[in-house]
Structure formats: C-alpha cells, structure tokens
C-alpha cells in the first residue's frame, strides 16, 4: 500500500470488511465524538498522558474525520483551507497574535 494515500488505505480497509454500509454521516459524526472523548480521557487525571495512547486515540479521531469527509464529498485539505480563511478574518494577526481571547473581544 506504499503508493496509496492514507484516505485510499482507509477506503481499502473499509471495503475489505464491507463496513461502508455502517458509515452514514450520522454514525461517523457519533464515532468522531466518541473517539474524541477517548482521546480526552487520556488526559483525565494527568496532563502528561501516555503518548502512545494519545497517538492511538488521535488516529481513531482522524480516521473517522477522513471517512466523514469522504462520505459527504468534502476534500479535507480544502475545507481546512476554507476554514482557515474564515478564521483568519475573525482573528487578524495584528489583534490576535499571542492572545486567546474570542474574536469579539479582540
């Protein structure tokens, strides 16, 4: 699979198991939230979480995000770029640099 993109590898993995039938946008969104909760659980009692566990949970979140993007026909790179443009307008560098304030408080 060396020549495949990660998205292609995920698609092949899902196809081999006939799991696409379960991958409705709703189910994928639920899975993202569930896996994000498991990621957060890594930090529940200790800010220095076990890095390997964090990586595993992050991989699950990213996998479901890529599956959802594919399912709704969205290019992950493009929707991120689009969102960065919108966020850049709300948080101009000259007012937001080094600050964590919400855009309406800048």
Image (tube, rainbow, N blue to C red):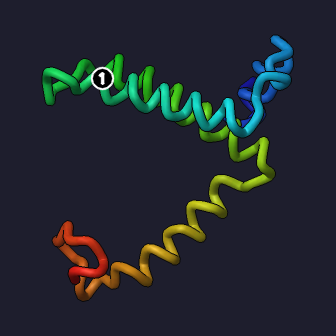
- Compared with 79, 55 (above or below) is above
Q: Give the residue at mark 1.
A: 41
Measured as percent of width and height from the top left, residue 73 is found at: 80, 52
Mark 1 Cα-neighbour bin, 10 Å: few <14, some 14–19, many ≥20: some
Image position of 67 (left or right of 83): right
Q: Which residue is drawn at 30% across and 82% down?
A: 93
Relative vertical location of residue 33 with respect to residue 102 in this rendering, above or below: above
Measuring from the top left, give residue 62's x and y in whole percent: 54, 36
Q: In this view, does 61 lie to the left or right of 39?
A: right
- Judge left or right: residue 100 versus residue 27: left
Judging depth in this view, the residue of 61 and 29 nearest the camera is: 29
Which type of secondary structure does the marked residue at label 1 adopt?
A: helix
Q: Quadrant of residue 28?
A: top right
Q: Position of residue 82 (x, y in %)?
A: 59, 70
Q: In which quadrant is the N terminus drawn? A: top right
In terms of depth relative to the viewer, which is nearer, 13 or 100?
Answer: 100
Residue 66 is left or right of residue 84, and the answer is right
Residue lying at the far top of the rendered structure: 17
Residue 29, percent across and down?
A: 61, 37
Q: Which residue is drawn at 48% across and 26% down?
A: 35
- From this view, report whether residue 55 is shown above or below residue 82: above
Q: Please give the count of numbered marks on the rendered protein.
A: 1
Q: Which residue is drawn at 51% across and 32% down?
A: 61
Tell me the residue at 42%/78% (across/down). 88
Please identify the quarter of the rendering in which residue 50 is found.
top left
């Amino acid at each position: 699979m060396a020549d495949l993109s990660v998205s292609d590898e995920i698609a092949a993995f899902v196809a081999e198991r006939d799991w696409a039938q379960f991958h409705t946008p709703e189910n994928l969104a639920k899975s993202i939230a569930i896996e994000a909760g498991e990621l957060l659980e890594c930090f529940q009692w200790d800010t220095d979480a076990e890095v390997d566990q964090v990586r595993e949970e992050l991989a699950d979140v990213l996998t479901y995000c890529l599956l959802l993007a594919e399912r709704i026909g969205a290019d992950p790179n493009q929707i991120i770029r689009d969102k960065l443009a919108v966020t850049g307008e709300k948080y101009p560098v000259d007012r937001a640099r080094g600050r964590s304030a919400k855009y309406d408080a800048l």
